[in-house]
Amino acid sequence: LDAALCVPEYRRPPEHSLSCAIEDGFEAYRHLLREYPDSEIVIAGESAGGGLAASMLLALRGGPLPMPSSALLMSPWSDTSGEGSEAGLMHVGSTRGSRDYLPLGLVNMFAGLARGDLPQHE
C-alpha cells in the first residue's frame, strides 16, 4: 500500500468530554494536511473512535478544511443522545434490552460519561 499510519493520542472520557476528543482529532487532521498536503487522508475509527470519526466528518462538512479522501467507520458508537437516564438509549427499543450486547444501564452510564454530563468520582 505504501501508506503511513497516524494513530493520534486524544483526550478521552470520562476525564474529558467528547468535544475535547473532537478538538484533538482536528489538531491531528490539520497536522496531516500540513505535513502531507498531496496525500490521500483517510479518517477511520472503531466503536467510540468510529463515532469520533463520524463527528469529525460532520463538523468538516461545509467548513474551511477539506474533506478526507475517504472514511472507514467500524461499528461506530454514535448515539449518545438523550438526557439523564435516557442517555445513549434514544434509539433502543425497550424489548431489545435483554438481547443487547451491553446492559442498557451500562450504555446509559457510558453515554453520560462520554458527554461529560455525569459527576466525576475520584
Image: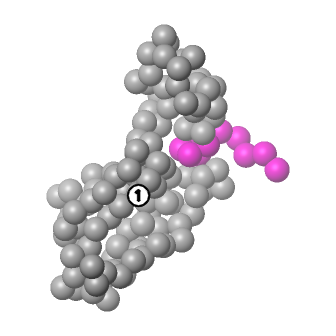
**Split into 4 quadrants, where in the image is the N terminus?**
bottom left
Say which residue appears at 39% left-offset and 77% top-offset: 5
In the rendered structure, the answer to whether residue 108 lies left or right of residue 76 reads right
In the rendered structure, the answer to whether residue 35 lies left or right of residue 93 reads left
Q: Quadrant of residue 101?
A: top right
Residue 50 or residue 80, whichever sits in front? 50
Q: Residue 32: horizontal and vertical position, in percent?
A: 33, 80
Residue at the right extreme, as displayed: 122
Magenta span of residues: 113-122
Residue 102 or residue 107, whichever sits in front? 102
Q: Secondary structure at mark 1?
A: strand
In the rendered structure, the answer to whether residue 56 lies left or right of residue 105 reads left
Q: Is residue 118 magenta?
A: yes
Residue at the front extreme, as displayed: 1
Is residue 91 visible in the rendered structure shown here? yes
Task: Please determine whether, in this image, residue 89 is positioned above or below residue 63.
Answer: above
Is residue 55 visible in the rendered structure shown here? no
> What residue sits right under mark 1 in the picture?
45
| Dominant secondary structure (helix, strand or loop) of the stretch shown in magenta | loop
Query: Looking at the image, what colour scheme do you see?
Result: one colour
Residue 18 or residue 77, whichever sits in front? 77
Residue at the bottom extreme, as displayed: 35
Say which residue appears at 35% left-offset and 73% top-offset: 29
Q: Residues within 10 Å of mark 1 (few under 14, many from 20)?
A: some
